[in-house]
Image (cartoon, rainbow, N blue to C red):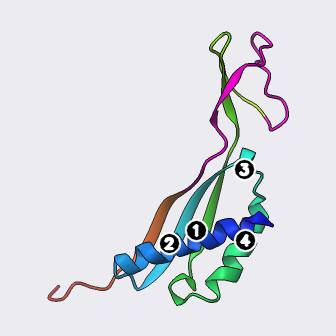
Amino acid sequence: MHELGIMTGVADSVVAAARNANALSVESVTLRVGQMTEAIEDALYFAFDVLKEGEPLLAHAELKVIMVPPRSRCLECGAEYQHDRFHMLCPQCGGSFTQLLEGRELQIDNIEVELPDEEGE
């Protein structure tokens, strides 16, 4: 289950960013995960739920996962198209020389935190 390793890295990064901002808590985390990473969406949610039990800053955080389908460009005719993990041939010319444009990303898109009130306001 590589999802636990992925989410451990995500949780560590989110907690570090929250601490750096002097946040009281993390409200939500949004991830973009390419389908070509072969990460299983439900396993990502499960791993995050397990990891947030041991970290007070994440205790009430909500995870949002955006699964990104593969999109490629044909290097023979230039067509761009979406496909699944197994059918990458160009639908326009049938070419097999392609460049993957999207579908392998694994990035934290957004972190929402609760910050302390400013003094004097």
What residue is pinned by disc 3?
37
Amino acid type of the residue tagged 3 in the rendering: Thr
Q: Is residue 57 above or below residue 77?
A: below
What residue is pinned by disc 2?
14
Q: Is residue 33 above or below residue 112?
A: above
Crowdedness of circle 1 by 10 Å Cα count: few (<14), some, many (20+)?
Answer: some
* Residue 88 pos. (x, y %): 79, 27
The answer to whether residue 114 is left or right of residue 87 is: left
Quadrant of the rendered structure where residue 43 is?
bottom right
- Gap between marks 2 and 3 measured at Cα: 20 Å
Crowdedness of circle 3 by 10 Å Cα count: few (<14), some, many (20+)?
Answer: few
- The magenta span reads 84-107
Assess whether mark 3 and mark 2 are in contact (beta carbons under 8 angstroms): no
What residue is pinned by disc 4?
4
Instruction: Determine the secondary structure under disc 1.
Output: helix
Q: Residue at x 40, y 86 (%)?
A: 24
